[in-house]
Amino acid sequence: MASGAANQKVITFDEAWPILQEEAINKIIDHLEGIQNHQFTSEEYMRFYTIVYSVCFPDQIGPEAFKMYEQYKKTFQDYISSKVYGEMNDQIRDAIISLIDKEREGEQIDEEIVKKALDIYVEIEEGSKKYYEQDFEEAMMNASTTFYSKKALEWISNESYEDYMIKVEECIDLEKNRVSNYLKFGSKNKIIEIVQHELLNVHASKLEEKKHYYEAVNKTEN
């Protein structure tokens, strides 16, 4: 047994990992994803075992063995994290956006739960807002655009100029409060720009007509 170990060809982690990645790990992931149903043969299992053994057997707690362990762990942690996080994020993100829309409609929501859920996006990247911005904020801004676009069409048809402008100010104030209560500060200017664009800029000509009518009526009454 000792003689077998002595005669075993030693290879480095950098030599071994590309082989394991290409011939073993990628095929396992493809199998899990349903891309390709690959069943490893006994010979393949033995080959992969031999490669790992050749890296680790000279010193099982040495730097080469440590590299092998760490890279193996990282590869599967990254895969599992990406799958679980991706699926969970879709559900959590949609649930949060739904709650925000309900609050915009006047319903009471548990803001503390929303805040804690959004904090997770920052905690994942240890203080960075990368995941918050790319996995939540972008979708939330798109949903906000849709929400205020619909409200603008409804209000511009049914409200007077004065009442419409009051609603605009109320929406801006509520969005500022929303940022203070649970959204991240970087969202403030973005969401205010959306409110102003959808409620004011998109319907600028119609609002100008309403304004002239409003001023004419007030002038007549006075």
Image: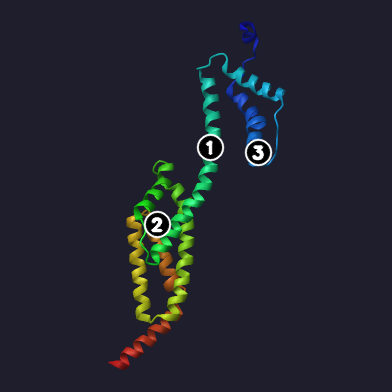
Position of 54 relative to 91 (above/below): above
- Whichever of labels 1 and 2 marks the residue nearer the N terminus, that label is 1
Residue found at the far top of this picture = 3
Q: Identify the amino acid type marked 2.
A: Ser
Check disc 1 and report the residue beneath it.
78
Picture quadrant of residue 216: bottom left
* For the residues bearing labels 1 and 2, Cβ distance under 8 angstroms: no
For the point 67% across and 24% down, the residue is 45
Q: Which color mode does the image show?
A: rainbow
Q: CA distance from mark 1 to mark 2?
A: 28 Å
Residue bearing the label numbered 2: 187
Give 68 or 118, whichever is nearer the viewer: 118
Looking at the picture, does residue 153 appear above or below residue 85?
below
Q: In the structure shown, which secondary structural element does the residue marked by tag 1 occupy?
A: helix
> Which residue is at a point 40% across and 57% down the rendered structure image?
187
Q: Mark 3 or mark 1, which is nearer the start of the sequence?
A: 3
- How many tags in the picture? 3
Q: Residues within 10 Å of mark 3 (few under 14, many from 20)?
A: few
Q: Are marks 2 and 3 in contact (CB under 8 Å)?
A: no
Amino acid under disc 3: Asp
Image position, residue 13 (x, y; %): 58, 23
Of 120 and 107, the residue lying toward us: 107
Closer to viewer: mark 1 or mark 2: 1
The x, y position of residue 66, in whole percent, is 51, 22
Look at the image and tell me in which quarter the C terminus lies.
bottom left
Cα gap from disc 1 to disc 3, whole angstroms:
15 Å
SS of the residue at dot 3? helix
- Up/down of 154 relative to 110, above or below: below
Regarding mark 2 in the picture, which secondary structure is present there? helix
Check disc 3 and report the residue beneath it: 30
